[in-house]
Image: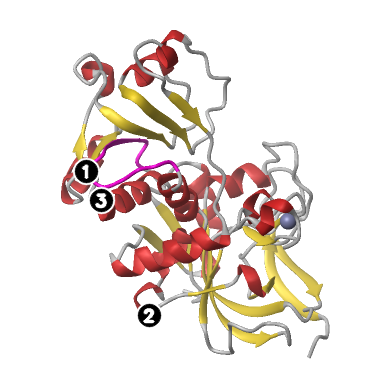
Amino acid sequence: MNEDMEIHALAAKGQGERLVPFIYEKKPTKDDVTVRVLFRTVSMSDIFQIDNFWHSTTYPIVPSEDIIGEVVQTGENVRDLKVGDVVGIGYQVYSCGACDYCKKGLDQFCEKQRNLRVHEHGGLSDYMIVDGNFVFPIPKNLQKPEATPLFCAGLTAFSSIIHNGVTEEMSVAVVGIGRVGHLAVKFLRGMGCKVTAVTEDPKKQKYLASLGVTNRNVAKEHHSLEKSFDFIIFTGTRTVDWDMYLKMLKPTGKLILIGLPQKPLVFDAINLSDYANRQIIGSYIGSKDDMKQLIRFASKHNILADVEIFPYSESHMVIDMVRNNKIQYSAVITNSTS
Ligand SMILES: [Zn+2]
């Protein structure tokens, strides 16, 4: 117990490089849980990290920020978890527990937070050693590959929905129906909201209809959609006509940015103000309590992600597919070898 453990992973050792086998050692503390990884996602944010897009990557970098695994060892301070528990792990893996934010249950704003790929290696590995406070037990109906994207992509969507006053019967538009957007749609439908999707992908029409969602072509219909939505949840990264989107919000409506548009937002402030008091709001993961609430909500409403599942041996191919936008919603890598 509490000896250095050898962890076998796949890592990029330099900017944009192909992943190679990488072994690192980590010693679990009394607060840590050792988890055998069962499923993990690879997403575009992994590619951005591998490519040093945000100019913050330190190499080697092990990808993956949504993980499901099985507890194989617990430190002596860990109370709520035991060997054999199936658990989820997301982007944030540590907070100080003592600062004002942590005391208020806003641990995602802790200045001392540690996050996967930024401060700790991600989940494309055989094991992970993580602070037990950020390891979340999951019920039986979520113990499957399709639940993996809930723990980072899902948490970000869920927390922005529950903390901005979205309630049932509200009219919400989700812009961009990919990894995060399709989960936002499922959460909103689970809450009983009237959901409109904004996507230009004709292949997704049938899928959206099966979720009870209307799809609108805003480029053509924006005039008739003015003052239609209580919320617009934007999950894309492209620059759009922000004035057009602001006008589609009802008075006091909120434009929530989950995706990060790559260029500065340009809009006419009159569209925030006149007859409206609209808001534009940022979004950053969620707290530990949000994660627990998400797990209960997803379990109750049987909300899973749409995923494509690949064996560990095909990790390189998955990275290439994600990089080239060949994954429709989420890619999950299991431990099988073929
Ligand atoms: Zn703190």
Marks 2 and 3 sit apart, C-alpha to C-alpha, by 22 Å
Q: Nearer the viewer, residue 333 or 88?
A: 88
Q: Quadrant of ligand 1?
A: bottom right
- Residue underneath mark 1: 169
Choose mark 1 or mark 3, whichever is in front. Answer: 1
Give the secondary structure at mark 2.
helix
Q: Is residue 149 magenta?
A: no
User: Within 8 Å: ligand 1 and the Cβ of disc 1?
Assistant: no
* Whether residue 151 can be seen here: yes
Q: Nearer the viewer, residue 236 or 202?
A: 236
- Residue underneath mark 3: 189
Marks 1 and 2 sit apart, C-alpha to C-alpha, by 30 Å
Please say if 180 is above or below 29: above
* Whether residue 118 can be seen here: no
State which region is magenta. 164-177
Label annotation for residue 177: none
Residue contact between numbered discs 1 and 3, judged by CB atoms under 8 Å: no
